[in-house]
Amino acid sequence: MADLSPIAAWRRLLAMPNESRTKTIVMAFLVSAVCAVLVSAATVILRPIQTANRAAEEQARIEALVAGIPGMSELLNSAGGSLSTVVIDLARGAAAGDVTPDTLGAALADPGNWTALDPAADIAELGQRPDYAQIFLLRDESDRISLVLLPVGGAGFNGRIDAIVALRGDMNTIAGMAVTRQSETPGLGARIEEPAWQAHFAGKQFADESGTVRFAVARGPASSSHEVDGITGATRTGNAITRIMRFWLGPDGYGPLIAAIRRGEF
């Protein structure tokens, strides 16, 4: 009677000639199976390390962006804290309980998590606005919010403009602004990336006493606490920055969040 044990079957397989098609197929299958198990095990073992590394990289990226905003490094150092991040449900102005920074990408890949904008309200020319956004908070030693970083973006003269706007704890004073992506005309609109121009944002009030967003890039020198100096020859880019800021700091952007922070809900 033939021995049907796994050991005997393995011995018969090894005894086959190396040119045997059966032996080649079986060995290839076994090697593939072992490799799959090893890869799966490595993924499980390394996942916590990878998550920690991604978090560290994200923190470093955020702090690098903050360092590029005039005065922000000093503010971080004086506060003695670090930035935390939260995903916001923009319509409610509250933390999105079912979406985290790790799952935000997947959430925004779903067309159902985008809101079509009425043309009259779409001053930033986005077409549609994501329902969720990742923001960054800095708290002081009393656990009060001293700085909020808000990603903003919209259509520029030559293409999309993306930036990060930093607001102080009163949620009306701009602490700084850093452009993270732009394709404007070199020597003209592209000057929005220059630290010297971005420095004009610090200390500006984006809304008046009634809460109406008044921020604007002037055509020339700024003439009010709501304006920053314009860039000569880059009026269209300046207008684009005005529209982007007014949209995102208004009711269809971060307006509900700004109101919630002012009410002490964060």
Image: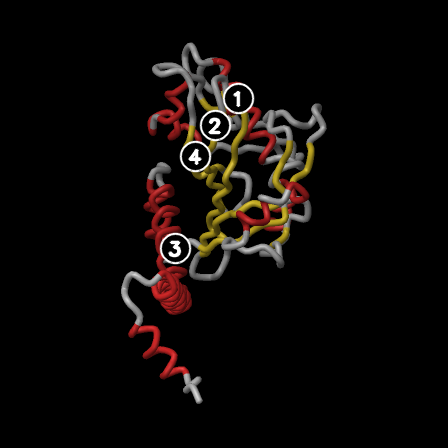
Of the image marks 3 and 2, the number of the one nearer the N terminus: 3
The answer to whether the residues at label 3 and label 4 have Cβ atoms under 8 Å apart is no
Of the image marks 4 and 1, the number of the one nearer the N terminus: 4
Of the image marks 2 and 4, the number of the one nearer the N terminus: 2
- Disc 2 residue crowd, few under 14, some 14–19, many 20+, Cα 10 Å: many
Q: Tell which of 103 and 252 is nearer to you.
A: 103
Q: Nearer the viewer, mark 4 or mark 1?
A: 1
Q: Quadrant of the C terminus?
A: bottom right
- Disc 4 residue crowd, few under 14, some 14–19, many 20+, Cα 10 Å: many
Q: Which mark is residue 177?
A: 4
Disc 3 from disc 1: Cα separation:
33 Å
Asked which secondary structure carries label 2, the reply is strand
Q: Residue furthest front?
A: 1
Image quarter of residue 80: bottom left
Of the image marks 1 and 2, the number of the one nearer the N terminus: 2
Task: Tell me what residue is drawn at x 62 percent, y 54 percent.
Answer: 96
Q: Tell which of 195 and 160 is nearer to you.
A: 160
The answer to whether the residues at label 3 and label 1 have Cβ atoms under 8 Å apart is no
Q: Which residue is tagged 2?
A: 161
Disc 3 from disc 4: Cα separation:
25 Å
Image quarter of residue 64: top left
Task: Tell me what residue is drawn at x 35 percent, y 58 percent.
Answer: 53
Disc 1 from disc 2: Cα separation:
8 Å
Asked which secondary structure carries label 4, the reply is strand
Asked which secondary structure carries label 3, the reply is helix
Where's residue 232, x and y in %?
Answer: 41, 12
